[in-house]
Image (cartoon, coloured by chain):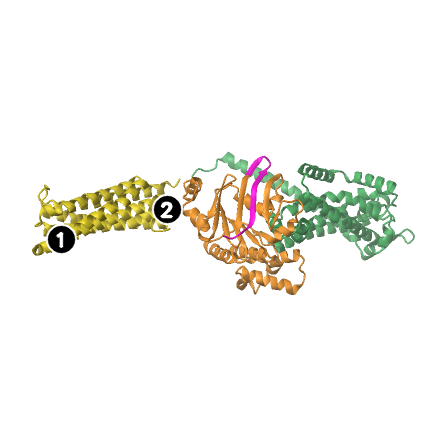
Chain colours: A yellow, B orange, C green
Amino acid sequence: MRSRFDEQLEELDRELIIMGAMCEEAIACSVQAALTPGESPVPEGEQVRRVGELESAIDRKERDIESLCMRLLLRQQPVARDLHSISAALKMISDMERIGDQAADIAELSGFIRSADPAHMEHLRRMARETIKMVTDSVDSFVHRDVEAARDVEKYDDVVDGLFTQVKTELTALVAADGENAEVYLDLLMVAKYFERIGDHATNIAEWVEYSVTGKHENTP
Amino acid sequence: MTENIIETKALNLWYGDHQALKDVSIGMPTNRITALIGPSGCGKSTFLRTLNRMNDLVPGVRIEGEVNYAGQNIYDPGLDVTWLRKRIGMVFQKANPFPMSIYDNVAYGPRTHGIKSRAKLTEIVEKSLRDAAIWDEVKDRLNKSALGLSGGQQQRLCIARALAVELDVLLMDESTSALDPISTAKIEELAMELKNSYTVVMVTHNMQQAARISDFCAFFLLGELVEFGDTETLFSTPSEKRTEDYITGRFG
Amino acid sequence: MEKLSGKRRAWNRTMKGLMYFCAGITCILLVFLMGAILYRGVPHLSWALVSGVTSYIKNTIGILPNILNTVYIIIVAMVIVLPLGVGAAVYLTEYAADRRLAGMIEFAADTLTGIPSIIFGLVGMLIFCQLMGLKEGVLAGGLTLVMMVLPTVMRTTQESLRTVPQAYREGALALGAGKWRTVRTVVLPNAIDGIVTGCILAIGRIVGESAALLFTAGFGVELNSFASSLHASSATLTVALYIYAAERGATDEAFAIAVILMAIALLINLTANSAGKRLKRGRGGL
């Protein structure tokens, strides 16, 4: 019956998916720039620039989706499921925007960690893969409104946190052993932290996906 | 949890052959506002009118089941209906002040129930008009005709008139649907004040109003009570799909 | 712009002329009637006529007794018909649950209004004078008139009750008023304009009635007090007109009485209209 409203809700969905895809791309580019400089066809200055562009686009997208949501709240006075969808969208875009920021931060550091020994980056590469998976899965769970999938993403955060702890331990040892290259190792630690933060944001997104379907959020009893 | 001041058990109602209410069992919590919502023809107004037996006025009406108030079934043949209507009053969709003075309108109820002393009546009139948040607007023209008031004022006068008889429960049958937004807002504020001393049961087809001011909500559909619960839960995570479809405007 | 064809215009003009003609005839009739009566009657209107008493001995004609008899008979009839008619109307409108029965009663009432008044006179004579043993007089005449006028009062009261909005009744009942109290305090006061109009129309009919009173109120022209007129043969103004015109050949006086009766009829119509309007305005309304 409210076909215009339904169309607008579909538009909101599409925009969120686009934003999610932009986040995925931003992470992929920054990972390539930082961790696999020799392997990508595109020169790495290019990739860093590309991430910068994506990050700005993500910021713009956040503002667009935010104003769309505000308009829907004002005009349509949504209740129940519709209200959950729209308020979840408002929260999700801020997490996605932060993911964009983290990706840009990672890309910025790519220049500094180029001189690191590729062997030390194994865990980081694994973290990169896992966080990309988490972001992709959380966006997918939103697309399909799949509560189970969202819960899986939330649980997966533990994996990423565990990896971060491992990386931290390793790097601490490396700094102690090889004081001269401490700066590089600290940059590596920062990249690892950014990945861990991306994982947290992906978890938040998954929690809001759950809220949009069930009306219940993790943090409220 | 507050107790219920009125409870119905398996209430059924027929207008001739047509069954308008099917097996409705529900309790109205004391000192709360309960809203009855649902699409046109779903039985919410019919149900409201069973609570003060105004349905008795309709020829050919038949009722089965119980409506319990103050420990008795109000459809008991021995019950004094005028006593019932003293305790359970009603305000209608269109304000219907009598073509008398404001004073006489409000005094009509108390006079009906035996109060003759002019001093006592004046006292009651003032208190009721104050409780209905209209005293300041009419105190200087109590002897003027009630028909000279605006629509919103007339409706508040009708509320004052109902309050004058010492109600327990005030039934409001779409009482703001004919009013402008400002009058509506005043009456909504009034209802929220009134629930401290009385119980309010209101029929509304304005869902934002139900969401704004009611504590509990009952959703009716085709004569059945589909869902009853506290308003925030019902409007946020309703248990029945039919309820959700109605409140999100997907039908109705 | 298309102009009306000549034929069309001629047709319009003809019809218009025809309508004016019909209206004109109506007005002319009224003017003629009133004119004739005034012409023949006014010269013979005098204070002596109006305040005097007819006496064979003194050879005077006075219609004071007739005026008084008319007044008495109005009082008797209205005092009885008012509660009866209003009560019946209240029952039919407010209380009757069986609409078929109510419908039959209403039909009976409507039919009664069409029955020729001489028949009421005969029936009145049969019931009140012969069966109940009442003597010819204002009482018997009044009761006969009650039968005649009851439907009028009942129906106009009913119509008036129907115009009282249902919302008033619901409002009163919702406050805990019983049915009778609602009727007494809310419904009836608001139907008063219709009731009053009905009464005035009824009085008009009473004043104009002659055939029904011939055998029931009689031909007496003595001056009586109210109490004694009840059981004494008392001619009202209309009957007096008949007596003086047909039996005594005093056509001049008859025309004078006609003038008075016409004036009364006019007065009653005006009063009915203005009283109805004023009371209606006083009601305000939903």
Q: Are marks 1 and 2 on the same chain?
A: yes
Q: What is the number of the mark on residue A173?
A: 1
Percent across and percent down for residue C10 are 53, 36
B5 magenta-colored: yes
Q: Which residue is mark 2?
A: A215
Percent across and percent down for residue A154 are 28, 45
Q: What is the three-letter code of the residue carrying label 2?
A: Gly
The residue nearer to you, when weighing A92 against B103, is: A92
Percent across and percent down for residue C238 are 80, 47
Instruction: Look at the magenta stretch and give its main secondary structure.
Output: strand
Mark 1 burial class by Cα count in 10 Å: few <14, some 14-19, many 20+:
few
Q: Secondary structure under badge 1?
A: helix
Q: Is residue B249 visible?
A: yes
Please tell me which residue is depicted at 78% across the width and 40% down the height of the picture: C117
Percent across and percent down for residue C76 are 80, 50
Q: Which region of the structure is painted magenta?
A: B1-20
Marks 1 and 2, how far apart at CA:
46 Å
The residue nearer to you, when weighing C32 against B252, is: B252
Q: Is residue B83 left or right of residue B211?
A: right
Q: Is residue C7 left or right of residue A209?
A: right
